[in-house]
Image: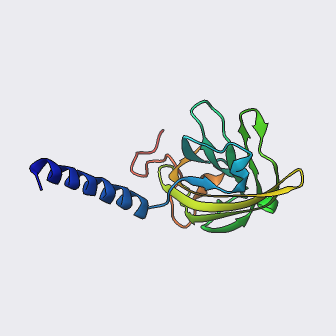
Amino acid sequence: MTMKGAKQVIGLLLFVLTAVGSTACGTQNDISGSLTDFYDVKFDGVRARLYSTELAIEFWRENGEVPVRLTLRIGEQPPKPGDFDLMTLGAITGRSDDQDIPFTTSATLTLDEFTPRSGTTISGSFDASFRAGGDKLSLSGTFETTLNVIDSVGGYDLEGFPPPDIDEDAPDAE
């Protein structure tokens, strides 16, 4: 094998190892299912926002569209990792190319990793069924992103976590 051929083989091996390593570590942001045949779910990124009344996970596009938005209503305390029925505790909404996401017939959100503090990692998955005309369609996805706390009630001092955006070492203002 020539030196040039060896470099090409090494380069190819490094590329393959990098690709395999990146898919083996962490959750991939992904959406799939039969709904994708009729509704454009392509997205550029995923963001998670915690409000005082809801947790929102948005698959967004650079043009401002949000083709898939998972909303989990919350009470006075944010949720802990687990499974949530979005038909009773939230919703799946979205808009893509001037088309609303079809009527949802069932939806489950699973939070694998969640701490109610800005800058922490949130990861999980969802499974949903939709009805469009006489068709039953499915959609599932995975996500891993950084949580952004927008506003909170009571500081979400949950199990010893400090309220977001508060420096515990800062002197008290007078």
Q: Residue at x 54, y 43 (%)?
A: 45
Residue 10 in the figure: left or right of residue 61: left
Residue 9 in the figure: left or right of residue 18: left
- Is any part of residue 53 visible from this angle? no
**In the figure, 155 relative to 26: above or below?**
above
Q: Nearer the viewer, residue 65 or 116?
A: 65
Residue 96 in the figure: left or right of residue 106: left
Residue 122, given in percent of the width and then of the height, sits at 53, 57
Residue 5, given in percent of the width and then of the height, sits at 16, 51
Q: Residue at x 14, y 47 (%)?
A: 4
Residue 116, given in percent of the width and then of the height, sits at 56, 57
Split into 4 quadrants, where in the image is the N terminus? Answer: bottom left
Number of marks in the image? Answer: 0
Residue lying furthest top in this view?
63
- Quadrant position of residue 81: bottom right
Residue lying furthest left in this view?
3
- Is any part of residue 107 visible from this angle? yes
